[in-house]
Amino acid sequence: MKHLLTLTFVFFLVFTAGAQDLSLFEKQLYVDGTDTLPCRILTPANFQKGKKYPLLVFLHGAGERGSDNEKQLFWGASLFLDSLIRAKYPAIVVMPQCPTNSYWARVQRQLKDSLTFSVNSDTVPTPPMRMVLKFIDELANSGNVDKNRIYIGGLSMGGMGTFDALARRPDLFAAAFPICGAGDPKAVTRYRKKLPIWVFHGSADMVVPVSNSRLMVGELEKAKAKVKYTEYPGVGHDSWRNAFVEPELLPFIFAQKK
């Protein structure tokens, strides 16, 4: 009987996840001059015009790049579509999509240095990052966003973009959660003082080695940031699977205010 109940529970979870309606993330195109940024936006279930909500921006990885305005929902969207989560944490969630041949951050791969990624936050931002930051500004001024509760996170290439956004707009974000990413260690001193940030990585990551997050966490600690670090032993590049089921992840994020 216990085995049957377990199977029934697992089936329920799978069925519930499969039944989630991704169309609740409304399709939008943010256009600025000749540049276009595809976005999917989830609003609270009982959205009220004029009420101010937290804004959470999630940046996808390299595999979800494109222009279909679909693939960026592959990882992470289900977390925010959970009905209990939506009821407990009513927020505006934005998942933009980076073009196929671009990146969120200016990144170079250093093959001679154990696959360390060199992220440069001192140059002009990539066009997608410029668009993301400009779109956040417009949303923040829409009258429906709590400017003291703007959050950013992302996985892999999106984790790199998260670190880059913190360096470029240090006073914009209330908290951040980069997963299996890399950043510019020289730029950490530009982050907002005592910024709450939770960094995740798998110790066996062969795509973006864990040394990248360890380096950033060390610099964040030196800068007196409010940094948390979770490293999953034996986990490879898909450490976002672990991070998404951390019971304290969303409580940590949504508790933060500037």
Image: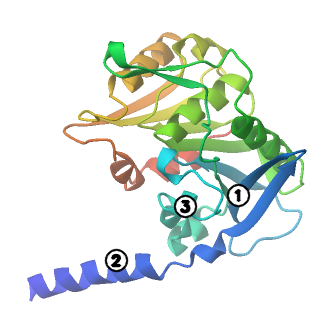
Which is nearer the eye, 204 or 42? Answer: 204
| Location of residue 43 with respect to 250 vertically, above or below | below
Give residue 80's position: percent from left, percent from top: 55, 63
| Location of residue 243 with respect to 22 vertically, above or below | above
Label whose residue precedes the other's in the sequence (1 or 3) = 1
Specify the amino acid type for callout 3: Lys
Q: Residues within 10 Å of mark 1 (few under 14, many from 20)?
A: many
Residue at 68% x, 14% y is 122
Q: Which mark is residue 39?
A: 1
**Secondary structure category for the residue under label 1:** strand
Q: Are marks 1 and 3 in contact (CB under 8 Å)?
A: no
Label whose residue precedes the other's in the sequence (3 or 2) = 2
Q: Residues within 10 Å of mark 3 (few under 14, many from 20)?
A: some
Residue at the disc numbered 2: 13
**Secondary structure category for the residue under label 3:** helix
Nearest to viewer (mark 3 / mark 2): 3
Nearest to viewer (mark 1 / mark 3): 3
**Secondary structure category for the residue under label 2:** helix
Give residue 169's position: percent from left, percent from top: 73, 27
Specify the amino acid type for callout 1: Cys
Nearest to viewer (mark 2 / mark 1): 1
* 211 left or right of 162 in image: left
Residue at 47% x, 35% y is 198
Residue at the disc numbered 3: 71
